[in-house]
Structures are given as structure tokens and as C-alpha cells.
Image (cartoon, coloured by chain):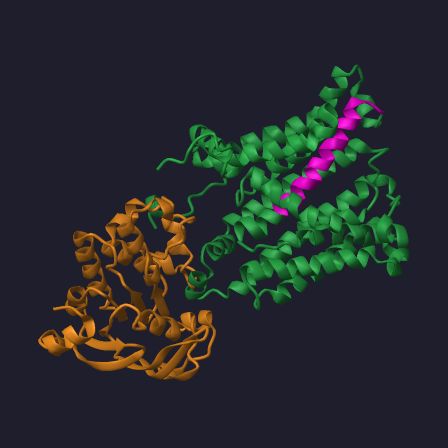
Amino acid sequence: MSAATNPYPPSRSGWLKNNAGWLALTLLLLALPFLAALLDGQTPANVLASETGNAKFMQGLLIEVFILAIYAISYDLILGVTGLLSFGHAMFFAVGAYATGIALKTMGWGLGQTLLAVIVASIVQALLFALVLPRVKGITFALVTLGLASVFSIVVRSSDLAAYTGADVGLQGVIVPALLNTNTARFRFYVIALLATVLVYLVYRRFVDSPTGRVCIAIRENENRALMLGYNTFTFKLVALLLSSAAAAFAGMLHALHQPIVSPNVASLGYTVAALLMILIGGVGTLSGALFGAAVFRLLEFFLDRWFGEIANSLLGLIYIGLVMFLPYGIVGTWRARSFQIKQGWDRLLRLLHLQHRAP
Amino acid sequence: MLEVQNIHTFIGQFHILEGVSLTVPAGSIVALLGRNGAGKTTTLKSVLGLTPPRAGKIIFNGQEIQGRRSFDIAALGIGFVPEHRAIFRDLSVAENLRIAERRKGDFARKEAFIFSLFPDLQRLIKLSGANLSGGQQQMLAVARALVPDNKLLLIDEPSEGLAPVIIEQMMEAIRQLSAETTVLLVEQNFIVASRLAQHYVIIEEGRSVQHGLMADLVNDKETIHRYLGAA
């Protein structure tokens, strides 16, 4: 095959070059706690000793961003890449969080057994979702998954299981092993959460670029066409579900370790909507968009709340409207398409506000 | 190669095919003719199991294939070129071709043949499907069906919406590929169909009403006028 027509040109040699931006961002994030400490008059030793201060607080906030990023990217894999509209994604996250909380607190297991429990739980729930896959499509699949997640949400809130799940209160004070204690070893947890995010992103991108991932994109575009090429599309959707469930459950596990509380809110529809918002902000189907979306989502929420207090939520809504108007494909999607619609964005906004009549 | 025996297909409540029979001899091009809504596309989709027939038999190379799953039918060696240039817009030209591989290396084996039929595609190999013109997309859709070793190609409306010069190119390509593959062709444009196919089958309101040699049909102005509305 000639080089000109090789559809997969060798890229490994240029890997570092192609990913220089990501590498720099990762290193910057690794250095950030120390920079924050220096600005605050602390020493790097203070950071490593998890001493209270801005640096520690900032790490806590960023850990939340990383966890949300893993959660959002796991949603992007099934919705953005494979085209499966699931309204039950919160369950993927909550199962990981509850498995961790129950294993550590109620059962008193060690970290290894807990991780195993989370992995098993994530496989079981992906298979549960896959059970309905061949029977329903599109919006019906969305409603069935919403139903499954609602059942899960009701079960964890039920008072009959209070001994395991804490019912409405959730699991308070999950007993976290010293190795991953975010209070006494915050920088370690920060590094683990950061590297986990990077790892999930790299694995997902490798998957999407693989022949299997390309078939998932083909399924999103038109499942019948993929069938006609001889692909059993169910298998590919199942693989996407398993990968998505694994990452989401892992994010849930980190969440339970970091907080260390598991609230029933993580199983609610609102948490699925959060995932949807994050990938809409970042750009559906772009993978990296989910990471930026999570950062914007969490940091906006935090700073608006800090600066504006009560009206923060209204402002957040306005900002989301603005993002949709000006960045219709999300941050990364719009950047890739190089279609910055400043003018069109204003027109859309003015039309929305009825200040300008629709062009005839 | 392909024998469709009196199939009845429903889409929802609607009885779309009310008895379609046709035979596609190996090595030939058979044109499936009929007016809009007669059931031509549904016939192709019934063969492929996308709209499985409720009654009747479909025999491909001696095996009954009705009721099998679409991807199993495709894997037997039936390629489909759907209407409306059904390529994957989010994948590049190369990826569109690669994804059609049924065995590793299919594309490498067929590359020279495909690019001899459609030299344009070689130039566009890295572009994404969405950036191709209508004619280029249609060529890619046909090329994609050539990647695996398909014994039978079902081609739906290859000339639809294309400029005359592109239609000529497409016809030449179909003529050349038919040297290797049997073709069942749905075509509204009777001139195109009559120049390509050796046999024809006419479908009217979900029933196959007439079949025979294309050479005979070309001179049968009355039949053409009655069923196809063309002069």
C-alpha cells in the first residue's frame, strides 16, 4: 500500500508532538498546588503534608473537577460517540459510589476488595442496560434507562435498606483507608485523580480511533448502514456500555472516597442532566470536550456562588444560554469546526429576546 | 444467485409488498423498475432483512435467508448501496472504506480495483465524508460495497440527483464492477437502467407484474408507458 493512500499513517513517532498540549496541561496541573502554595506564603512541604490553606482547598476543588470529568467523558462515549441516548447515566456513577460506600463502611472491606466490588457492579449494571438494548431504540431507550435509574434511586432511598445505604441521609462518614485519605494525603489523592482522568481520556481516545470505535461512530450516524456492512451492532454498543460503565463507576468510587459521603442525590435525574450539560458545554462526541465541560461546569458553579450568592443560579442559566447561542457545538466542537459564530450568535440571541425580526 | 419467491412485507400496519418474485442470475445486472412507491426499495430491504418479509422465500446461493439477521445476511456476501449517498459523514474516505472490511486486508486487496473505477477517491482519501460532493459521496457508497468480496450487490438509485457527466461515470463503474459481481439495480432513470441491465423486473403496487430481457422491454413502448410512465 502506498504511503499516500495509507488510511492510518504511522503516528506513534509523533505521539509526543501531537500530545504536547495535553502533556503540558498535565504537568501544569501537577505543579499548580505548589504554585498556589508559594503565592500563599506556604512551602512545597506544606502541600505534601496536606496543611490547610488555599493550595489544599484548590486541590479539593480540582479533584471534584477531575471526578466530574471522568463521569462526563464516560457519558460522551455512549451518547456522543455511539449515539445511545441514556437518561440513566447517574446510576452508572451512583453504583460506583454506593458500592464503595457500602463495601468500606457497612462491610468493612479493604481497598482491594472494594475496587473489585466496584468493577463487578459496573459490569453487572452495563449488562442490565444491555438487556434492553436490542428491544428499544432512541427515545424509548432513553425512557427505559430513566426507569432503571429511577428504580435504583428509589431502592437506595428506601428505609428498608437503611442499614446498607443510609436511605434518605445516604452514607455519612465513609471510612477511607489512610492511603487514599483526601484530608491527610490530599496531594496524593489529587495526583491519583488527575492521572486517572488522563488515563481514562487516553484509553477512550485510543478506543475511538480503533476500528471498533469507528464502528461505534458509524452506529451513531446510521445503525442500519453498519448492519448492512455485516456488523452485529449490539456487540459494539455493549462494548461501549461496558467501557462507559467502568469509568463512571470508577468516578463514583473516587467521589465516595473524596467526600467521604454518598448522598442519594448522585442517583437522581439531576446528576444525569449534569453529565449532559458538561458534554454540551464541551462539545458532544469530542471526548476532550467533556474534560473542559466538567471544568467550566464545576468552576462556574463554585465561583458564581462565591461572588454572587443567591443569584448565582440565575446567572448560571444565562451563561448556559449564551454558550448555546455562541458555541452551538460546544467549546471543543466549535474550536475544531473553526466556526465561531459571533455574528450569528448575536442574531440568535436578539431573536430569542424578540429584539430583531427573523429575516424573511 | 438470488431468488425471491412471492414475498409479503409489512411496514407497521401497511402491507407494502403483496407478492414480489424475481430471479437474479449469476453474473448479470437485473434492473428493478417501477414507479415511486411501488416497493422497489422495500424489496431490497426485505432481501437484506431490514424489513423482513412475513411470508415468502428468499434464496441466496441455495440457502434460504429470509428471517435471518441483517448482519448475517450481509456476511454471506451481499453488499448494499443505499439511496441518498449513504456514507458515514463523520468518517474519512479511508475510514469509510476500511470499515467495510469483512476480513483483514480486504481493502488492501481491492484498493487498486476501486481506485481504477473511482480515481477521484484516491485524491480525497483523507477528507471526511461530509466534505465530499454528492457525486463523490455516491462513488464512495459504491466503492464501500466493493471492499469485501461481495457476490451480489444491491444498488438503490445510483443516478439520483447526480449531474449527467457523473451519471456517465457511475454507469461505467457499475458496468465494470459487474464483471466481478452480480448486481440487482433499482433505478428510476429508465435510460440508465436500460443501458446497464440485461434483465428487468417491474413492480407495480407491491407486486412483481412483468419480467424479461431488457432488450425486449426497450422496444415495448406500451409496457414502458403503462408501468413506468416514461415514453
Chain assigned green:
A
Q: Is residue A53 magenta?
A: yes
At horizontal 78% and vertical 34% (from top left) the residue drawn is: A188
Segment colored magenta: A52-74
The percent coordinates of residue B125 (x first, y second) are 34, 47
Where is B225 relative to A250, above or below?
Answer: below
Chain assigned orange:
B
Seen from the viewer's position, the closer of residues A89 and A195 is: A89
Q: Residue furthest left?
A: B219
In the rendered image, the quadrant that contains the C terminus of chain B is bottom left
The percent coordinates of residue B161 (x first, y second) are 25, 55
At horizontal 73% and vertical 20% (from top left) the residue drawn is: A36
Rendered image quadrant of residue B177: bottom left
* SS assignment for the magenta stretch, majority: helix
On screen, residue A208 versus residue B73, left or right, reads right
Where is B121 relative to A324, above or below?
Answer: below
Seen from the viewer's position, the closer of residues A272 and A118 is: A272
Seen from the viewer's position, the closer of residues B88 and B118 is: B88
Q: Is residue A120 visible?
A: no
The percent coordinates of residue A206 (x first, y second) are 55, 47
At horizontal 60% and vertical 31% (from top left) the residue drawn is: A319
In the rendered image, the quadrant that contains the N terminus of chain B is bottom left
